[in-house]
Amino acid sequence: MANTSRHAAWEFWGTELKRRREDAGLTQELLGRMVFVSGGYIGQFEQAIRKPQLDVAVRIDDALQTEGFFERTWRKLIDDRRYADYFAKTAELEPLTTKICDFESMIVPGLLQTAAYASAIMLTGNPFAPDEYVEEKVRARLDRAVILKDATRPGYWPILHEAVLRVPVGGSAVMADQLEHIARLARERKILLQVLPLAAGPYPFMGKMLTLLEFDDAPPVAYTEGVYSGNLLDDPAIVKRVREGYDLIRAAALPPEASLPLIESAAEDYRQCASTT
């Protein structure tokens, strides 16, 4: 519900932009030239497909003489502390996608994480964090996964390096639950899962993660993440190169029918280990 209500708020922002632009007698192309973006981007702002940068919102206020309306509204909508600043835009785009392709080299992707696994990840990087902080972050991560339950859910194609299965985050019981959760989603055909085996050797973007997001009526984007930093890439040439790298990883990965038994076998190993400790 949180994502839905926030998207509705951005739709209001876009509707107001269109109304005030038309009241000023400006086309999307003309307003775009005035604020140094393309007319197509103005159209995407108006449809709530994309969200403008703060400096663009400020320039829109100047161009339309709206006395700071779009800047103030932008600041209120963007002030969501559930996600790191560098990831917040990507989180906003996820519910709008028609297809998401993920590759993770070391940890389970956020959309697939269980509460216990997510909590263990959070505590690893924040060992002195209060329970309230951890619970808020875990809740935000689980909220994102709601899109996989919707009837209109996007096609979700995650590829996990086998290292993801072998690093015991949170202990054996947590890992057993986590891998069983992933296997269940695959069996229910809510995700199309592949595993890149250790035996595959080197691969593009070694040690990195990447996400590709596709939309009905907007160009695809890519997201990559580093240490307390992330990049949402929308340059078509760069997104094309990222997609080519993902395709090479997909070609080297086990097919879905071989990946699922590997996940299930790893889950069973963790379950047996948990039962003997």
Image (cartoon, helix red, strand yellow):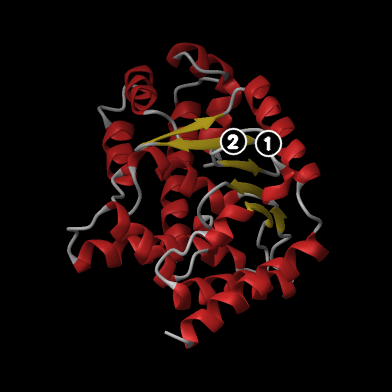
Give left or right: position of 24 versus 252: left
| Residue to which mark 2 is pinned | 206
Given residues 122 and 25, the one toward you in this image is: 122
Name the residue rendered at 54%, 75% in the picture: 270
| Residue to which mark 1 is pinned | 203
x and y, in percent, of residue 176 in the image: 53, 76
- Asked if residue 214 is positioned above or below residue 28 in the image, the reply reads below
Q: Residues within 10 Å of mark 1 (few under 14, many from 20)?
A: some
- Asked if residue 104 is positioned above or below residue 265 in the image, the reply reads above
Given residues 133 and 40, the one toward you in this image is: 133
Q: Secondary structure at mark 1?
A: loop
Name the residue rendered at 66%, 23% in the picture: 236
Name the residue rendered at 34%, 40% in the picture: 85
Given residues 136 and 33, the one toward you in this image is: 136
Q: Quadrant of residue 147?
A: bottom right
For the residues labelled 2 and 1, say whether their Cβ atoms are less than 8 Å apart: yes
Q: Quadrant of residue 30?
A: top right
Q: Residues within 10 Å of mark 2 (few under 14, many from 20)?
A: few
Please state, as top left, top right, bottom left or bottom right, where the C terminus lies in the image: bottom left
Amino acid type of the residue tagged 2 in the rendering: Met
Given residues 210 and 263, the one toward you in this image is: 263
